[in-house]
């Protein structure tokens, strides 16, 4: 094992030792071999890291890490100066196309399958003033006289900080309203690279990325039928560990665990002339992936943990088929899709297609302008546990799945907690504070053999066949939508009560969530396990762990033991008059 060092004081012609460090991460990546470690020291590195190779196994990986105690930034932006005043607080900057090299994000527009531009052209580039992202507008007149964006989910007044761009044959012109700031004194950055850390080719396996701050990627829309390029992404690989990073200000997605483009790129848009239905196109897309070897032998098994991900335009974490058999845990996700300048079908804190045997646990997700967690197609063997979600449009959306999948010991605290457009789900020991919406669907989607990507069948989704056991349900008549669904649901031990309350306060460094749940103590409940949950109607599968061992909900949200055969409803084994949860802005 060789450790290569990278430092702002280094030189790419040196050996990479601690005494003779390299200057760029890319230079270290070019020479690192399986088993090697790249340690990056203090500073800001304005480059795109494109790993040319990965490791060979979980124990012989290539590790990229920041030096202990050092603050290391990898940025997809460049600082620009030479701003000229236009009128009032509006300035302009002219840049030759050569400044951008082979990728000009102020000419590249956001587009792709299931993208909605809401009647405006959007570029992948962004403008930042003293670290704050500004909002794009279509014309100079809108920059000269900015108006609050009617759909913005962000802080009041933030959408008045606006910019637009124009291009000629030779140059790109950026206009921006800096509201009294002098851009030649302040730090103004433009995102110029499509990603910060992403391999150009798929199959760069067993890479660890640890302890970095990454920002300002001019990312493209990441549809599940396209190559999904994130600010940080695995590009259809296996066995990555992404941990202890700060990821912010991606134009679209922060971390991608998804597709390459060998099966096509935005294939639904390319089939519109044939009036192809989106569901049919995606089912064909999945079959093509299987023929190319989509399985746990080659793809997935990633760990994404302990990251802080915020200020992303579409999603914090997205994965089309590539997240299979992965763990997404203890991440803090917030301020996602809050500008809402564009829309579509891929916006969420966590948005996964085909999350087969995926564990999503111990995450804090809040202030998301659409869904907190969105599990879309082929959700099977998936477990969502001990997460806190609040201040979203809807906390969880499960779309066109056949199950089995499980939500346990979560706190869903927004006005709408669940949107269910699937069958075969189990909801056990959750706190569900908001509305439960249930919607019928007539699309046909795949279901699989247990713990496998191999398709057992494709059939229409029959909404229902869900289990609600030992939950606290705070919304009046919370499960009424199921009454018109084609399949029955199974309920037991739920505390349906309006006497519980939830208060959320914002402090200087944390959100404080105060829960008053004492009234649930009197509700009789029975212990729940794999046997109690039964088997799904369509797939005839049991609710089990990913290793096929039986489930037993004998620990709570805190990891405390639930003793006896008559536990308390909800995620907490011991319910006091007041329970405090803290969501720290770490």
Image: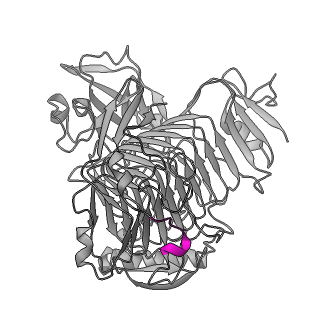
Residue 249: x and y in percent read 43, 38
Examine the structure image and report whether residue 386 is included in the region drawn in magenta: no
Report the side of 4 relative to 443 (left or right): right
**Between 229 and 171, which is closer to the camera in this rendering?**
229
**Between 127 and 385, which is closer to the camera in this rendering?**
385
Q: Examine the rendering and report whether any part of residue 15 can be seen.
A: yes
Q: Is residue 511 above or below residue 492?
A: above
Examine the structure image and report whether residue 530 is included in the region drawn in magenta: yes
Q: Examine the rendering and report whether any part of residue 112 can be seen.
A: no
Residue 475: x and y in percent read 25, 56
The structure residue drawn at horizontal position 44% and vertical position 67%, both measured from the top left corner, is: 225
Q: Is residue 299 above or below residue 190?
A: below
The structure residue drawn at horizontal position 52% and vertical position 65%, both measured from the top left corner, is: 382
The structure residue drawn at horizontal position 53% and vertical position 45%, both measured from the top left corner, is: 558
Residue 78: x and y in percent read 47, 30
Q: Is residue 346 above or below residue 250?
A: below
The part of the chain drawn in magenta is 526-533
Number of numbered discs:
0
Residue 559: x and y in percent read 57, 48
Q: Looking at the rendering, in which quadrant would you find the N terminus?
A: top right
User: Residue 516 occupies which quadrant of the picture?
Assistant: top left
Q: Give the residue at the far top of this rendering.
A: 185
User: Residue 70 occupies which quadrant of the picture?
Assistant: top right
User: Residue 461 occupies which quadrant of the picture?
Assistant: bottom left
**Between 325 and 179, which is closer to the camera in this rendering?**
325
Q: Give the residue at the far right of this rendering.
A: 1
Report the side of 113 relative to 255 (left or right): left
């Amino acid at each position: 094992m060789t450790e290569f060092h990278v430092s702002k004081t280094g030189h790419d012609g040196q050996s990479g030792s601690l005494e003779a460090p390299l200057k760029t991460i890319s230079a270290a990546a070019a020479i690192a071999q399986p088993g090697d470690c790249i340690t990056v020291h203090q500073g800001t590195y304005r480059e795109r890291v494109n790993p040319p190779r990965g490791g060979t196994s979980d124990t012989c990986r290539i590790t990229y890490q920041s030096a202990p105690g050092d603050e290391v930034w990898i940025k997809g932006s460049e600082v620009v100066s030479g701003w000229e005043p236009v009128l009032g607080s509006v300035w302009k900057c002219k840049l030759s196309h050569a400044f951008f090299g082979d990728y000009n994000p102020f000419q590249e527009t956001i587009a792709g399958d299931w993208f909605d531009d809401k009647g405006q052209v959007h570029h992948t580039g962004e403008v930042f003033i003293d670290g704050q992202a500004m909002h794009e507008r279509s014309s100079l007149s809108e920059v000269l006289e900015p108006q609050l964006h009617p759909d913005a989910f962000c802080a009041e007044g933030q959408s008045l900080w606006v910019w637009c761009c124009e291009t000629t044959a030779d140059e790109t012109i950026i206009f921006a309203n800096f509201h009294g700031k002098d851009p030649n004194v302040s730090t103004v950055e433009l995102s110029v690279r499509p990603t910060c850390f992403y391999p150009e080719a798929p199959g760069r396996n067993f890479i660890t990325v640890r302890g970095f701050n990454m920002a300002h990627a001019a990312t493209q829309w990441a549809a599940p039928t396209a190559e999904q390029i994130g600010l940080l992404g695995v590009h259809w690989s296996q066995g990555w560990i992404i941990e202890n990073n700060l990821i912010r200000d991606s134009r679209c997605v922060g971390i991608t665990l998804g597709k390459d483009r060998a099966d096509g790129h935005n294939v639904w848009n390319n089939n519109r002339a044939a009036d192809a239905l989106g569901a049919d196109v995606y089912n064909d897309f999945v079959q093509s992936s299987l023929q190319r070897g989509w399985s746990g032998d080659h793809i997935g098994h990633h760990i994404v943990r302990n990251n802080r991900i915020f200020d992303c335009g579409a999603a914090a974490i997205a994965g089309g088929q590539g997240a299979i058999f992965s763990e997404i845990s203890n991440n803090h996700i917030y301020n996602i899709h809050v500008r809402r300048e564009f829309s579509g079908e891929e916006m969420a804190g966590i948005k996964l297609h085909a999350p087969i045997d995926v564990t999503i646990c111990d995450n804090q997700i809040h202030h998301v302008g659409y869904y907190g967690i969105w599990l879309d197609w082929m959700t099977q063997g998936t477990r969502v546990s001990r997460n806190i979600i609040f201040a979203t449009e809807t906390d969880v959306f499960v779309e066109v799945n056949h199950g089995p999948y499980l939500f346990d010991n979560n706190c869903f605290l927004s006005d709408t907690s669940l949107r269910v457009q699937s069958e075969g789900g189990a909801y056990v020991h959750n706190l569900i504070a908001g509305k439960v919406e249930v919607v019928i669907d007539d699309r046909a989607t795949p279901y699989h053999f247990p713990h496998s990507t191999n398709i057992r069948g494709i059939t229409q989704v029959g909404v229902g066949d869900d289990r609600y056991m030992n939950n606290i349900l705070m919304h009046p008549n919370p499960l009424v939508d199921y009454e018109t669904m084609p399949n029955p649901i199974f309920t037991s031990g739920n505390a349906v009560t309006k006497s519980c309350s939830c208060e959320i306060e914002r402090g200087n460094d944390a959100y404080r969530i105060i829960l008053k749940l004492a009234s649930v103590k009197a509700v009789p409940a029975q212990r729940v396990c794999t046997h109690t949950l039964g088997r799904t109607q369509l797939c005839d599968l049991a609710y089990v762990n990913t290793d096929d061992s039986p489930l037993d909900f004998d620990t709570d949200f805190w990891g405390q033991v639930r003793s006896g055969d008559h536990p308390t409803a909800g995620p907490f084994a011991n319910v006091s008059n007041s329970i405090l949860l803290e969501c720290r802005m770490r």
